[in-house]
Image (spheres, rainbow, N blue to C red):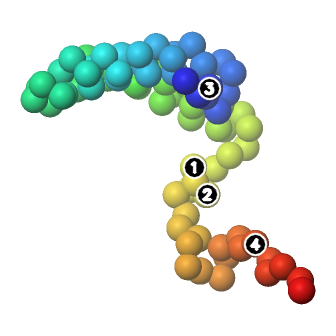
Amino acid sequence: MMNSIGKSCNDIKHEYDECFQMWFRDKFLKGKMNDDVCEPLFKMYQQCVQKSMKDNHIELKEVDLNYLGTDKECKVPPKKS
């Protein structure tokens, strides 16, 4: 499993990941679409990530911007011959 954006969020992220995997395997793949079982963990993790982003001066709006295909897209410079 990957760690979270903030070290303080790692434990809750791993709990949520385990819950999601269990739900996916035991419920979703058997046709049960209700995902409420992990919602409390997801909300706690979401709040932790938002706080960590704020503490690290990461703006959510910057994450949502679409740069692909625009002048702002970072591209690898062409190799020199």
Residue 50's place in the image compared with 61, above or below, is above
Amino acid found under the numbered disc labelled 4: Val
Question: Which residue in the structure is indicated by mark 1?
Answer: 60
Task: Determine the residue located farthest toward the bottom in the rendered image.
Answer: 81
Is residue 64 rendered to the left or right of residue 71?
Answer: left
Q: Disc 2 or disc 4, which is closer to the eye?
A: 4
Residue 26 is situated, as x and y percent measured from the top left of the image, at: 21, 17
State the separation of the CA atoms marked 2 and 4.
21 Å
| Mark 3, other Cα within 10 Å: few <14 / some 14–19 / many ≥20 | few
Sooner in the amino-acid sequence: mark 3 or mark 4? 3
Q: How far across and down, in percent of the image, does residue 56 sit?
A: 74, 38
Looking at the image, residue 14 sits to the left or right of residue 77; the answer is left
* Residue shown at 89% from the left, 86% from the top: 81
Amino acid type of the residue that numbered disc 3 sits on in the rendered structure: Asn
CA gap, disc 1 to disc 4? 25 Å
The CA span between labels 2 and 3 is: 21 Å
Image quarter of the N terminus: top right
CA distance for labels 2 and 1:
5 Å
Judged by depth in the image, the label closer to the viewer, 3 or 1, is 3
Which of labels 2 and 3 is toward the front?
3
Are the residues tagged 2 and 1 within 8 Å (C-beta)?
A: yes
Which residue is tagged 2? 62
Looking at the image, which residue is at 57% across and 13% down?
11
